[in-house]
Image: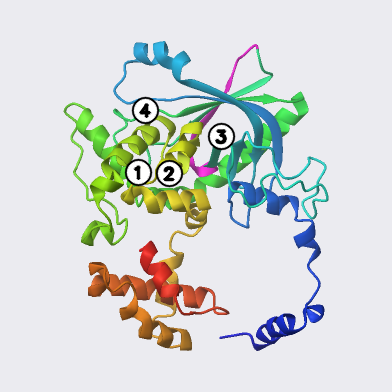
């Protein structure tokens, strides 16, 4: 399971640093593609195909308003940002934060790295939108910009439990700033990407149906829509806290207040894969996350939700593939299972121990070089 040569090299580097291998050139001058993925937390399969300066405007939508009210409030709630619009194989990304590379940088090496967003994640206002989550793109006739696009997302229209009559339509207006040739190249690339993205529609439905934000807003919409025959559904699995309770005093943690604030933001600015980052998003993160939304927001801001979008069955497939197989890591996992946060009721039950076992076992097979080490059970138990 363990690579002995790697272990020996690490030991030698600790004893005598002069024997350690020189750093890779990619570590000194990270590639443009690597910096792009770090900025927007994208999978390793993504590369920046096109980029252009653009102005992004977004009018926050609210369910239950009449069209006259929406038109009257549009000017009050609309926000506009100037930044860079990026297109990769499967994502459309916008951020007001400058990128870590210059336009002249190549995909293989970026000698002009300035460190602005290296490793900082999706900074600034904007969005990271999977192309499969876009329902429609229309070209607008405007006098201010040569190319203006209206992007309608699938926000609130993905799962069978959604109620289109009560869900607001999320439309993003993007004005491209560049030459006609640059704008046409970007739009042609977007067309090709949208056609390719249709094959991932089933993955999108599978992932969104497991997001608590979809359940949260869907329940509120179904209660507000008059005479809507919307079937009641159970909340998605968001961890052991839903079954055994969350640690801490809910009143002191102000969990209900946080859920109300986050519910308002998600209703106005999109949910899960169609979320738009505005200044309020950062402020809400500092206020804190409600327990039931914590896992989803961790996944979204770290980029792991995009990895799961690509391979939604990877976890289940890994467990099925290695079912019944033994390893040194699994033996060590079994020793530590009952010593994982024993004061929490969830890990005094078969349900909690079973979840912990499955996560640790799947990771040990996915990363055989590490397998399992002591205290990983505590980390996973806290996440569960």
Please tell me whether mark 4 sits on a helix, a strand or a loop: loop
Tell me if residue 299 comes above or below residue 266 in the rendering.
below
| Mark 2 to mark 3 CA distance (whole Å) | 16 Å
122 left or right, relative to 262: right
Judge depth for marks 3 and 4 and give the one in front: 3
Say which residue label 2 marks. 272
Badge 4: residue crowd in 10 Å (few <14, some 14–19, many ≥20): many
**The magenta stretch spans residue 227:** no
For the residues bearing labels 2 and 1, Cβ distance under 8 angstroms: yes
Q: Where is residue 319 in the image (x, y as percent from the top left)?
A: 41, 74
Q: Earlier in the sequence, mark 2 or mark 1?
A: 1
Closer to the camera in the image, 157 or 194 = 157
122 relative to 375, above or below = above
Q: How far apart are marks 2 and 4 (CA)?
A: 15 Å
At 45% from the left and 52% from the top, the residue drawn is 298
Residue 142 colored in magenta in the image? yes
Residue that label 1 marks = 213
- Residue range in magenta is 130-143
Q: Give the number of the mark in front: 1 or 4.
A: 1
Q: Mark 3 points at which residue?
A: 125
In percent of width and height, residue 114 lies at 76, 46
- Residue position for label 4: 168
> Which comes before the other along the chain, label 3 or label 4?
3
Q: In which quarter of the image is the N terminus?
A: bottom right
Q: Looking at the rendering, in which quadrant would you find the C terminus?
A: bottom left
Q: What element carries label 3?
A: loop
């Amino acid at each position: 399971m363990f690579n002995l040569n790697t272990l020996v090299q690490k030991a030698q580097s600790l004893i005598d640093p002069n024997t350690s291998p020189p750093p890779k050139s990619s570590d000194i001058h990270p590639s443009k593609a690597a910096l792009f993925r770090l900025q927007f937390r994208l999978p390793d399969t993504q590369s920046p195909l096109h980029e252009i300066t653009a102005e992004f405007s977004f009018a926050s939508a609210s369910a239950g308003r009449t069209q006259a009210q929406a038109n009257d409030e549009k000017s009050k709630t609309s926000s506009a940002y100037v930044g860079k619009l990026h297109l990769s194989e499967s994502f459309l990304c916008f951020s007001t934060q400058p990128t870590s590379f210059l336009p002249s940088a190549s995909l293989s090496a970026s000698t002009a790295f300035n460190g602005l967003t290296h490793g900082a994640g999706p900074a600034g206002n904007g969005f990271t939108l999977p192309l499969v989550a876009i329902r429609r793109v229309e070209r607008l006739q405007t006098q201010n910009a040569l190319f203006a696009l209206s992007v309608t997302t699938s926000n609130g229209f993905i799962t069978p439990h959604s109620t289109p009559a009560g869900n607001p339509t999320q439309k993003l207006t993007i004005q491209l700033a560049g030459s006609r040739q640059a704008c046409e190249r970007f739009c042609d690339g977007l067309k090709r990407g949208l056609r390719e993205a249709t094959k991932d529609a089933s993955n999108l439905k599978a992932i969104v149906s497991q997001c608590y934000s979809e359940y949260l807003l869907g329940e509120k919409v179904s209660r507000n829509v008059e005479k809507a025959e919307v079937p009641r559904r159970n909340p998605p699995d968001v961890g052991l806290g839903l079954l055994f309770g969350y640690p801490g005093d809910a009143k002191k943690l102000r969990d209900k207040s946080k859920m109300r604030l986050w519910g308002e933001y998600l209703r106005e600015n999109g949910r899960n894969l169609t979320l738009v980052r505005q200044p309020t998003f950062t402020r809400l993160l500092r206020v804190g996350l409600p327990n039931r939304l914590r896992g989803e927001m961790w996944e979204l801001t770290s980029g792991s939700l995009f990895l799961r979008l690509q391979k939604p069955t990877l976890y289940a497939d890994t467990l099925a593939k290695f079912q019944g197989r033994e390893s040194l890591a699994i033996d060590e996992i079994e020793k530590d299972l009952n010593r994982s946060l024993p004061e929490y009721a969830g890990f005094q039950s078969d349900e909690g121990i079973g979840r912990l076992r499955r996560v640790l076992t799947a990771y040990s097979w996915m990363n055989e070089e590490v397998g399992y080490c002591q205290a990983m059970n505590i980390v996973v138990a806290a996440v569960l």
